[in-house]
Amino acid sequence: MSRRPGVLSLLMSKKNRNTNSEQCLLSSSFRYADRRFLFGRIRLYRDRIDLFGLHWRGLHRRTIALRDVARLSWRTDTERSANMTLYLRDDEAVRLWVEGAGLWKYQIDARLGNQLNVADDLPGSTPSASAA
């Protein structure tokens, strides 16, 4: 008699992580700005972002196609609220707290083909004026 896997083992299993033999490019813990998870993970693949988490209602899973991301903003000055916001093409804003938000910003921009201008893109920074 075989034993059925639990929700936690399904959440953490490699089969669940790498669907269609795709390699996960980046993985971090996460939570929504207004909702916490037990074992929340966000994973970046070549064409999508997968969000997994366990909460009192059960397993949460959401997939966001990278082609649906219009822009992304991130912050370094917060620990309790959102430090990364995905603005989707359908005008939805997905507010997240992600471990390593700056790295996520860089990786998503690279996947979307955006150029990262470090001087203009750091949170709270202002572009420096060039000497004439």
Image: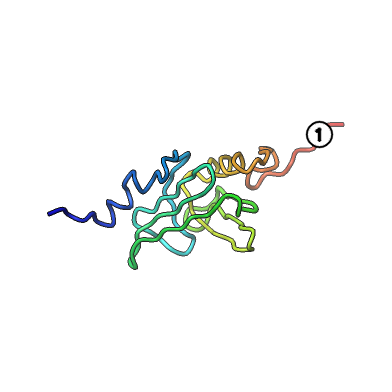
Residue situated in front as seen by the camera: 122 or 61: 61
Q: Is residue 68 above or below residue 119?
A: below
Q: Is residue 113 above or below residue 74?
A: above
Counting every numbered tag in the picture gives: 1
Q: 83 left or right of 17?
A: right
The picture quadrant where one finds residue 110 is: top right
State which quarter of the image contains the C terminus: top right
| Residue appearing at x 65%, y 47% in the figure | 124
* Colour setting: rainbow
Q: Is residue 71 above or below residue 22?
A: below
| Residue appearing at x 24%, y 56% in the figure | 6
Residue position for label 1: 130
Residue found at the very far left of the displayed protein: 1
State which quarter of the image contains the N terminus: bottom left
| Residue 121 in picture, x, y percent from top left | 66, 43
Residue found at the very far right of the displayed protein: 132
| Residue appearing at x 70%, y 42% in the figure | 120
Residue type, numbered disc 1: Ser
Q: Secondary structure at mark 1?
A: loop
Residue found at the very far bottom of the displayed protein: 57
| Residue appearing at x 53%, y 40% in the figure | 103
| Residue 79 in picture, x, y percent from top left | 48, 53
Q: 2 left or right of 79?
A: left
The picture quadrant where one finds residue 107 is: top right
| Residue 20 in picture, x, y percent from top left | 42, 44
| Residue 88 in picture, x, y percent from top left | 61, 58
Residue situated in front as seen by the camera: 57 or 5: 5
Q: Is residue 132 above or below residue 3?
A: above
How many residues crowd mark 1 within 10 Å: few (<14), some (14–19), many (20+)?
few
